[in-house]
Image (tube, rainbow, N blue to C red):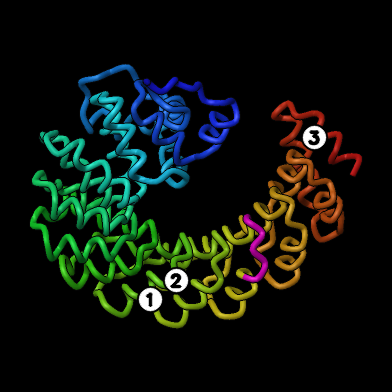
Amino acid sequence: MAKRYRSPSPESAARVLSSTDLVGLVVSFQHGLDIIARDLLHAIQWPSARTRGLSYVFPSMRHYPSFDALLPWVATHGPTRLADVLTFVQHPLLPLIAFCVAVRHGHLPVLVSVAPFVRDRTGPDFCLAMDVAATHGHLAVLRWLHDHRQEGCTRDAMSNAARGGHVHVLAWLHTHRDEGFSDRMTDLMSDVVVRGHVAVVAWMHAHRTRQWPRGLMDGMAARGQMDMLAFFHLHTDERCSTHAMDAAAAHGHLDVLQWLHAYRREGCTTAAMDDAAAAGHFQVIQFLHAHRTEGCTTRAVDDAASNGHLAVVRWLCRHRHEGCTWKALFNAACNGHMHVVKWFKTPTHADKWPIAVLVARTQGRFDIAALLLSA
């Protein structure tokens, strides 16, 4: 006699459905996406295009920040789960998105997981992968691409690694690749200096070039790049001009100013103290006054007053002999610095007031003339 079939009790069904392992086994035989995979696809929100390559996906990452949602998802569910999703969805753009996100962010486990899905995808735009990895300093990804892909890279890889300050990537590319730098070498060298990558400059000087563009040291002084200045001073024959000290003073880089005074012989001009006064760099003015002989012009007090730097105005008038012009009064009043205007109301500066009032009236600035007369 055949056994009668007994329907599972509600309690049995509940025990099965409450088991993560059993539910996973059951749904693996069902069609469709589970909630976890659906959440990933919803978060990425990839474009509808199906026939685009890396030259489309990499630039699109700026316009689709949702692509980056893939990495938190992988951190939670693992690269193997990502491979399951790619196997099921079979959309030609989705593996490329995962591939590009892994390269851009240096995520080697995701790259390895995605690799089988793009193994047969090739073309010139796959050179972008190594270029992007080099640009962002992802050496592990760069090495993997070198070992497992055939497209190689372009000269942008080495150039962008230099611009990004990734000297370890530079050294590796120099040893394992032969593309070299881009043709615009002079621009690249200037960019690396401006960005302050001393280690890259040292590497390039040792391995690639010993002839640097002229005028770089003046710019270093203006930007306050003390370490870069010291390197060029010790290891190259490059020179600076008086603009180096002038610019360092104007931007308030006292340490650079002191170093240039101690180790260089180009000196400065009156613009150093004039521009330092205009910007209110009190310590710079005092250093120049104590250690340099170039001095300043009337522009020092005029511009300091115009910008409301009363402490600088007082100090210059007490320690320097250049004095000022009517512009100090007029511009201070125009810029609303009445505390500076009132300070000038002394017999020493009595001759400046009539001229400043006259200029104000001549220019139709009767409001300024009234302020000056009422001060």
Query: What's the magenta region?
Result: 278-283
Q: Mark 1 highlights which residue?
A: 230
Secondary structure that dominates the magenta span = helix
- Where residue 113 sits: x, y (%)? 27, 45
* Identity, as a three-letter code, of the amino acid under mark 1: Ala
Where residue 65 sits, quadrant-wise, is top left
Disc 1 versus disc 3: distance between alpha carbons?
Answer: 49 Å
Q: Residue at x 23, y 52 (%)?
A: 159
At mark 2, the secondary structure is: helix
Q: Secondary structure at mark 3?
A: helix
Q: Nearer the viewer, mark 1 or mark 3?
A: 1
Q: Amino acid at mark 3?
A: Ile
CB atoms of marks 2 and 1 within 8 Å:
yes
Q: Amino acid at mark 2?
A: Met
Q: Observer-nearest residue: 87 or 120?
A: 87
Q: Which residue is mark 2?
A: 226
